[in-house]
Image: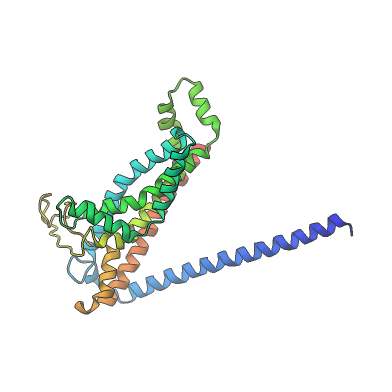
């Protein structure tokens, strides 16, 4: 056996060992995720009653609506600003100390504890404005947490595109702005949607940032559609407890409710299903866009 053959076999053993270890870790994480999901769904639906889907104190309909409504408002703010920030970093920002500081700031913001963002939102969106706790302030706080995810994914998506995309568009007479809006962003949209999915997932599960901004009470009247009323479901300037926050309240102040444990488990199951459906729908749309681009 030659030296090269011995080295090849040694490298092959190391490669198989590393592949086995990484595969085992991946399988363990996948099994753990499946077990956790099945357990939450089982605990959530094993004691399900029809009252849990009502707008009463025993139901979660109001909290479910508040969650979807808050995520909608947070994405309405964070998606345009995040995509614009990513485009600036990828296409306009020069490589200097300022842009390096800006990238470090974005990375720091993405790892910032949500309770800190909640305190910031309470000081700026509640105390300085004179408002009480409301969904709009909660959405602004959540959008701060979503911005780094969308901006980073947009930046990386545009940078990973072949240079011929931009050069070909400019060669055909398009301006730089037309190239960005008509070529680069649509081509990078599948990866940008990944950032939006991660941002929405954080919005669905956020609770700490909403303690000081959105409030812990909900009083909705589904027959009242006056946007100025505090009981109108579409009024964003009213207090609104989300599902994640509702779970926290039920598990910390559960003695106030007769079936707090069952409602908390059901809320957790609904939150898991809702996040999965949103992620699946967005991923399906992303795959369809990617297939159209490769035809």
Name, please, the residue furthest toward the top: 173
Residue 81 in sight: yes
| In the image, residue 251 above or below residue 75 | below
Name, please, the residue furthest toward the front: 97
- On the picture, is 200 further left or further right than 230? right
Residue 63 on image: x %, y %: 24, 62
- On the picture, is 201 further left or further right than 20? left
Residue 232 on image: x %, y %: 13, 54
Q: Nearer the viewer, residue 106 or 50?
A: 106
What sort of colour scheme is used for the picture? rainbow
Q: Nearer the viewer, residue 98 or 111?
A: 98
- On the picture, is 155 further left or further right than 236? right
Residue 206 on image: x %, y %: 32, 60
| In the image, residue 17 above or below residue 89 | below
- At a point 14% along the width and 62% down the height, the residue shown is 219
Quadrant that contains the N terminus: bottom right
Residue 153 on image: x %, y %: 45, 46
- At a point 66% along the width and 62% down the height, the residue shown is 18
Q: Nearer the viewer, residue 52 or 17?
A: 17
Q: Nearer the viewer, residue 203 or 97?
A: 97
- On the picture, is 132 further left or further right than 42? left
- At a point 43% along the width and 23% down the height, the residue shown is 175
């Amino acid at each position: 056996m030659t030296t090269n053959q011995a080295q090849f076999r040694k490298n092959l053993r190391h490669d198989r060992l590393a592949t086995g270890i990484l595969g085992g870790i991946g399988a363990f994480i996948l099994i753990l995720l499946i077990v956790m999901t099945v357990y939450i769904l089982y605990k959530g639906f094993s004691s399900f009653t029809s009252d849990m889907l009502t707008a009463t104190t025993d139901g979660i309909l109001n909290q479910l609506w508040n969650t979807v409504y808050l995520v909608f408002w947070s994405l309405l703010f964070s998606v345009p600003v995040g995509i614009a920030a990513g485009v600036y970093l990828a296409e306009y920002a020069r490589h200097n100390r300022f842009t390096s500081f800006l990238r470090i700031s974005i990375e720091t913001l993405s790892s910032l504890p949500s309770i800190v963002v909640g305190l910031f939102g309470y000081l700026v969106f509640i105390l300085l404005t004179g408002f009480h706790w409301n969904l709009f302030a909660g959405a602004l706080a959540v959008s701060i947490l979503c911005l780094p995810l969308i901006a980073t994914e947009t930046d990386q998506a545009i940078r990973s595109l072949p240079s011929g995309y931009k050069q070909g568009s400019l060669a055909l007479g398009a301006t730089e702005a037309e190239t960005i809006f008509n070529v680069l962003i649509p081509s990078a949209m599948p990866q940008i949607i990944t950032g939006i999915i991660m941002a929405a997932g954080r919005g669905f599960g956020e609770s700490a940032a909403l303690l000081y901004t959105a409030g812990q009470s909900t009083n909705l009247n589904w027959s009242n559609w006056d946007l100025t009323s505090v009981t109108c479901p579409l009024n964003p300037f009213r207090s609104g407890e989300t599902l994640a926050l509702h779970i926290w309240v039920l598990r910390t102040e559960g003695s106030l409710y007769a079936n707090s444990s069952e409602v908390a488990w059901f809320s957790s199951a609904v939150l898991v299903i809702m996040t999965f459906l949103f992620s699946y729908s967005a991923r399906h749309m992303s795959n369809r866009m990617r297939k159209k681009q490769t035809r």
